[in-house]
Image (cartoon, rainbow, N blue to C red):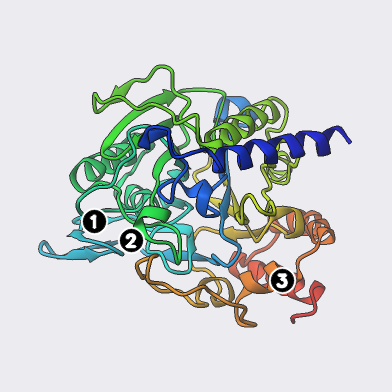
Amino acid sequence: MKRLSVSLVFVALLLALSLMPAALPKDKQITLENPIATGGAISCDTWVVLKDATGDGTTLFGKNSDRLPFDSQVLVYNEGREWESDSTLKLEYTEIPQADRTYATMGSSPYWCWGYEMGVNEMGVVAGNEAIYTKQHEIEPARGLVGMDLLRLGLERGATAREALGVMTDLLEEYGQWGSATPTKSDEEGSYDNSYLIADRNEAWILETSGRSWRAKRVGNGTASISNVPTLGEWDLSSGNEIETNWLNMISISGKTRERRSSALLGSKRDLEGMMEIARDHRAIPGICMHTIPVVSEWETVASMIVVLPADGSIEVWWAAGRPCSSVYVPFSFGEVPDMVSKAGKSVTAASKVEQDSFSESSYWWLLHERGNEGLKELEKEFIAGKDSAKDKKEYTERCLNRVLEEIGAA
């Protein structure tokens, strides 16, 4: 009953803000430029447990990706390679020079996007991003990079978390981040600034951005988490420009609530199963495992990833398609990914021009989105028990995926 009352209060506040009269100054209005008026982004959560806090030298990273319910994702692997000196990279809105060398990466990627919502590279650098809303957010004269592209670029070009941070801030200052990152939405409706949590086996960095401005803080031990709100009261590096939270945007208030909740959970949940519990948590309003809120927001958790970085240098990825409370984490070793989770419907298209994705029986994501249930998580015990003894890791992943499909009647 108490949780229901809190939910009703939260919804009432959201509605009150969405109906705020236009007599307010433009930067305080809830307008089409502010996603709460258009069913826009209301949550994502990213968290990390560094090696000193796990007890065995392992670093753990997790993220829930929250987007429109049709914004399907694939788990993809992209090989590292050397590039010709005049190579370029064509993204959704712009074309940039390619790096001389890129690292291999794995990431969870929306069906229309070149970049990743969360991912890891061969060097053990991990990253996740969040939409944030600031008083400095404004329309730019030209489109630039979307936050997910910046994230993947950091992973492809950075051998450490600090190197990835430098790559991302350099590109941010040069190209900006204006352009819709929300499928079927215009630039004004679907563009947002980003914060990031970037980590490796030795440290983590929290990066907050607004337009081409940024600030970053190093985390050398313990745990860290971010959500849809700037939280840095002090920082180690910055572009020198101010970044102020737009507290009249309820997304910021929701983000603060969830950031506090994930921080509290990290006090005790510092192993693989604990990371899964955080991703499935519903205690915050809205939950870390996000569900659509009728009238207020269409958005929900559409994918979740946990990355395990043991001290021996190996990389283990656990990926759940759809809401983690009605899905199952499947283990992947770093490397090639089975076609059933990596191929369906993938393109690189401007979000404002892409059509809604729709159900396909060839898409593992869509099958889990439509047929997932809370009982699937019981399979994780089986998957965890068998992963270390499996000689062929890719074959083991395929067996796990087939077990999931059997359970939902899609084998």
Badge number at residue 80: 2
Residue at left 63%, top 30%? Answer: 257
Question: Looking at the image, how many numbered discs can be counted on the residues?
Answer: 3
Q: Residue at horizontal 85%, vertical 60%?
A: 375
Mark 1 and mark 3: Cα distance apart in space: 40 Å
- C-alpha span from label 2 to label 1: 7 Å
Query: From this viewpoint, is residue 283 visible?
Result: no
Q: Position of residue 251 (x, y in %)?
A: 54, 39
Dividing the image into 4 quarters, which one contains the N terminus? top right
Element on which disc 2 rests: loop
Taking depth in this image into account, of 125 and 250 the one nearest to the observer is 250
Q: Is residue 218 above or below residue 63?
A: above
Mark 2 or mark 1, which has the lower sequence index? 2
Q: Is residue 408 visible?
A: yes
- Name the side, left or right, on which 241 lies relative to 359: left
Q: x%, y% of residue 226? A: 53, 34
User: CB of mark 2 within 8 Å of CB of mark 1?
Assistant: yes
Give the residue at x 49% y 29%. 247
Q: Nearer the viewer, residue 86 or 397?
A: 86
- Comparing marks 1 and 3, which lies closer to the viewer? 3
Residue identifier under label 3:
370
Q: Which residue is mark 1?
A: 101
Up-down relation of residue 103 to residue 55 (above or below): below
